[in-house]
Amino acid sequence: MSVFASVVALLSAAPVAAKEKPLTDQVTPIMGTVSIAAPAQALSFARFEKNGKPALMLVESYQDSAVTGKDLSTLFDVSWEDPISLFQNYTYAEIQVAVENNVTLAEVGVPVDQLLMPVRLTDDHIAAGTNFPAHAEEATVEDGPFLFPKRVVPTHARSSLSMGKGLLDFEVELCFVAIDTLNVSDKQGRVGLLLCNDFTDREKLMHHLDAFDVTSGKGFTTGKSAPGFMPIGNLFVVPQDHRAFSEPLTLTLYHNGELAQQAIQSEAIWDYDDLLEQIKLRSEASWAYQGEQVSLALSGDMIAPRTAILAGTPDGTLFKGLPFKYQILGVMDWVFGGWNEPVPYWIVNRYVDAAKAEKSYLQAGDRVEIHVEGLGEITTTIVP
């Protein structure tokens, strides 16, 4: 594409302000109290420290910033410390019946802020971009959704995160987690559910993406894979039917006590089966990341256990697209001597400089809270 054509394309793609979707609840959430599904619908797990080691709890109640439930240390005469390991040895029905019939299981209560990470995951995950229509509109991304690898070690639901030197943004997301090896062709394999916050450095992402083909996913792995960019929820929930269970979940995220994101999972463009189909279609694709080409976490048709599939975020992120004035200013910077860099570089620079001056992204001292009934919570404090 010629330089002239690039400038024309950028100007013609000037975003139209997205219509704001009314949020249904403008009050601070009742953090510390979450509804727990009945065992016939889903089994909810948390991990806690016992005698200096991780122990597994079947959660029965989550109220007043404490969880209570049954200590599974003696279930099947094995000391279980991870829910995926438990499910890799027994079926849902076997676990449910064993818990109901084992009168020796001790009741235990643990403050929410003392819970451990609920499950062990890999550091190689699959993420969907602009999978909610309203978020695609606010980000002015057409022709989505799309996929990309997210390569990061998950962190604790109460972990803090440095604001860094870029533009730190939040994204509440539902994660489908492989319990067994998932086959993307026949869509077989058991799945658990987690919350996560798909934190993003918008500056780094925008400087690495393809401005003319955003849905290629180029640059998204780079902008979303820094240490601490994937805190996960404090519960691991295994439904009888993860498709039916996930659809009515309402994702909510609060920024400094103000409701910022809210949507029902069923609003997503790609549902669980669509995500698996799209992953299969991109089995040969690769993305540049840290000097090498990386692919989706897929081997043949198989997704390994403990891999998370991030199902996209609703609208309400801090990023709302690049305003037209910064596109004009960036083009002028290029015209008046900035030929050493492409036009998109100068447009992004103009936007980044203004956003930093206005402190319109996450700042030290900010608090980001995610609360989803039936699925748990995440609280992240932003530090310098």
Image (tube, helix red, strand yellow):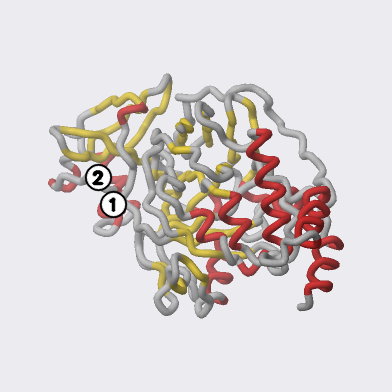
Residue 56 pos. (x, y %): 25, 40
**Residue under the image location 67 percent in, 59 percent down:** 345
Q: Identify the image quadrant of residue 52.
A: top left
* Label 2 neighbour load within 10 Å: few <14, some 14-19, many 20+: some
Say whether residue 50 is left or right of residue 368. left
Secondary structure beneath label 2: helix
**Residue at the spot x=71%, y=57% of the render?**
346
Who is closer to the viewer here, 226 or 347? 347
Question: Is residue 190 at least partly visible in the picture?
Answer: no
Q: Residues within 10 Å of mark 1 (few under 14, many from 20)?
A: few
Q: Is residue 165 above or below residue 4?
A: above
Residue in front for this viewpoint, 326 or 187: 326
Provide residue 184's location: percent of width, then percent of height. Answer: 48, 72
Secondary structure under badge 1?
helix
The x, y position of residue 380, in whole percent, is 46, 34
What residue type is disc 2 on?
Ala
Along the horizontal axis of the image, is 38 left or right of 80? right
Q: Dot 1 corresponds to which residue?
A: 94
* Quadrant housing residue 45: top left
Marks 1 and 2 in Cβ contact (< 8 Å):
yes
Q: Nearer the viewer, residue 356 or 323?
A: 356
Q: Is residue 285 left or right of residue 227?
A: right
In the drawing, does residue 226 fall left or right of residue 207? Answer: left
Q: Report the quarter where the N terminus lies.
A: bottom right
- Looking at the image, which residue is at 29% across and 45% down? 97
Q: Position of residue 321 (x, y in %)?
A: 73, 50
Identity of the amino acid at label 1? Glu
Name which quarter of the figure residue 188 lies in: bottom left
Q: Is residue 235 above or below residue 130?
A: above
The answer to whether residue 256 is above or below residue 296 is above
- Residue 98: give its label: 2
